[in-house]
Image (spheres, grey):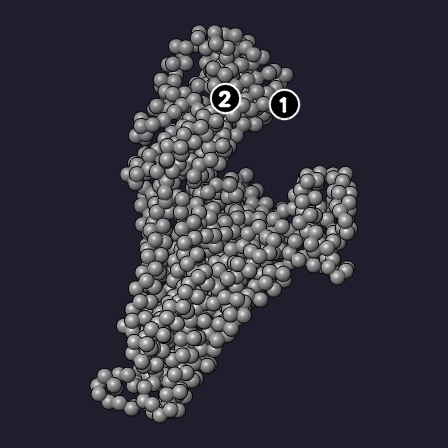
Amino acid sequence: MGTHAHTASNHEHLDIPIEGMTCAACANRLEKVLNRLDGVQASVNFASERASIVADTSQLKTIQAAIHQAGFQIPSQNFTFAISGMTCAACATRIEKQLRKLPIEHAQVNFATETATITAKAGQFQISDFQAVISRAGYAANAVSEASAAQPSLSRQQPWTLWLAVIGTLPFLYDMLLMITGEHGALSPLLQLVLASLVQFIAGWRFYRGAYLAVRGGAANMDVLVALGTSAAWGYSTWAYFSGLHTLYFEASASVITLVLLGKWLESRAKQRTGAALSALLALQPQTASVLRDGQWVALALGQIVPGDIVQLRDGETAPIDGEIIQGQVEMNEAMLTGESLSISKLPGDTVYAGTRNLAGSAQIKATAIGSQTQLAAIVNLVSQAQGSKAPIQQLADRISAIFVPVILLIALITLIATYLLTQESSTAIIHAVAVLVIACPCALGLATPAAVMVGVGLGAQHGILFRNASALELGSHIDTLIVDKTGTLTVGEPQLIATEYLAATTFTPQDILLWTASLELHSQHPLAHAFQAALSQQSPKQSLLDASEIESTAGFGLRGLVAGHQLQIGRPDWVFPAETIASLQDTLARYQTEGHTVIALAVDTLPAALFMLQDQIRPGSLAAIQGLQANGVEVLMLTGDHPDSAARVAKALGISQFHARCSPNDKYQTLLALQKAGKRVAMAGDGVNDAPALAAADVSFAMKSGASVALETADITLMHNDIAHISAAIALSRATLRKIRQNLFFAFIYNILGIPLAALGLLSPMIAGAAMALSSVSVISNALLLKRFKWQKSDASN
């Protein structure tokens, strides 16, 4: 466990990172706490934020508890391994069980991607610790990055073994064809023995090795079924040959091995296609860039670029890094971020993202993020994690896979005994039992869900829809109610200052009022705040904003602060002005609000100073998106902090029958809880700032962000293009993916439910059973790949 050097028989040297230390005194305090523990020697380094501890391995939990009680945390660490040797879902279940015996937080093995993801406290384990556990279970593990691990690779099986199996089996097929025409004995029994033995013990050696490792690890998998079944057929036929009997089944053992090998090869090919979307994302970023060094432009590999470097982006090139344009102008295609293929003009001061393509122009870019820090890397990591996660619907298949092989072995044994008792023919009993062993396929159960999840998540990423995990993908299909904010979601989110009415109480100039207001609103994240800065920039382009201090923000109401020596309060009129002032302005407020304006009030030194009238435009695609959601059975509810008249105008224009105005963040949260208590599956779409409580409580949260500020870590579903139309597309894709998962699970279950009894009754020959087993997994993956034909309607996504 994280061993660096042994100091005693049961003592280890642990190097543990520590979070929460703010000064050297924290390190000293933690060090004293740890050294008070019996048998523990600790040294805590504040600069490196790590604790070097020598202790008995049995004290690890005590040490962790002491660190936590002292007010510090040990961060979690993710380990990702590529697993070789898995042949079916039972293998993945076996590895998971072995890993979960360790004191870790989480372990998940994905049969479709052939990866294991482990989460444990940092410093507690080394890579070799997990590799040893996986090796003892009978498999090999190589540590890889999450992104590369999510790309399924072709089977490590050597192609020549498949060719050997095919060549050794073809003569049996030729012999069977001749038998149909009435000709017998084309293949001598000795030649059959030789060919079948080559296939059985050379081409089929992988099944014996896999079965041995599985049994040694205390479990059984698909290899056990194939090895037992084909060995029984080959063994009986060999005994019959040397006994002088004519009933030989060499073609059964050879054809089963060949067909299963062919099926695994086809399965590997199909798995590669499920990860095609992630591979496409990884291929977006170029490997070199033209960088300014010592006054010269030189071509450098991405690994040599550092933040602050100046990178040249020419016409037709793809941006290698995230950065800010310092010179030039370009037209960028950001489809990889937003799913929107239209070009976007970028000027000095604008941000360019790695992987986006320059359609026209050239620019010099100052690198701000490189490699794993870029927006592209964040998307790739998110997609790879989501593709490797498990959907809740997979739990049933996992439970069945865990006991599948032992149950099949029992059924085969019962078939063997029962058939012999009924027929008194050992050859018939063996062949029936062999058919049972080779028709059973736990692989199809293991692949049913992850194959569809990989395709669905990848497809979403290509269209600017990022699912945080498989649970979000599944839950998105159940949504029947969507709560949306108005500003920035249904509307463009860029309100304009239409008019200003200055009140008699103020003696300040209009220029001062606008300058002070814009300076204070600079500290607000609300979309309305930018309207004042835009108005000031238009009126006085060279005017600099003033400093603001003592800022207090009241969510849903407004902002207070000190600007130019004056106390400003700006926000909802009923929050800013006293009741008597509101009463005197009632007619004025009613007039503007009836016209659909959002009215913002300003008080200077507690005196009513101005009313600002702002208005936002409805997004062009909002109406079609709302209609699409409603047509698919999703009820849309608009909650906004705006005035009822402004809310009513937008609701009427978009055909939204239910809306609530003047909602505080807590009002939105309580409304969402009430809907959930009424049995609704509620999704929430918002900006993630004022809507945080409701977003956290929603069954599914949508973050509607541009690529510049996407909240990849928090939202269940992130929409890279800030358009409500993508919510409709996300729900539609979730439902389509869940349909594929259900179809796959049905196919996997019905295949085994029908196939095993038929084989037990002798209605399927081992060769047909082997072919069916080989093709079952391929059919499940192929069905998942049909999801790529998902139709992206204009009402679903604006691309």
Image x and y of residue 154, in percent? 46, 67
Q: Is residue 13 shown above or below 173?
A: above
Find numbered disc 2 in the image and state the secondary structure of the residue it sits on.
Answer: loop
| In front of the other: 394 or 413 | 413
Res. 564 mark:
none
| In front of the other: 553 or 754 | 754
Query: Of tags 1 and 2, which is closer to the observer?
Result: 2
In the rendered image, which quarter contains the N terminus?
bottom right
| Residue, disc 1 | 549
State the residue at coordinates (29%, 69%). Answer: 758
| Residue, disc 2 | 557
Image x and y of residue 16, in percent? 69, 50
Q: Quadrant of residue 413?
A: bottom left
| In front of the other: 208 or 23 | 208
State the residue at coordinates (58%, 12%). Answer: 605
Find numbered disc 1 in the image and state the secondary structure of the residue it sits on.
Answer: strand
| In front of the other: 647 or 497 | 647
Q: Residues within 10 Å of mark 1 (few under 14, many from 20)?
A: some
Q: Is residue 796 shown above or below 693?
A: below
State the residue at coordinates (48%, 41%). Answer: 715
Image x and y of residue 134, in percent? 56, 63
Left or right: residue 294 compared with residue 716: right
Type of the residue with mark 2 = Phe
Q: Is residue 431 shown above or below 403?
A: below
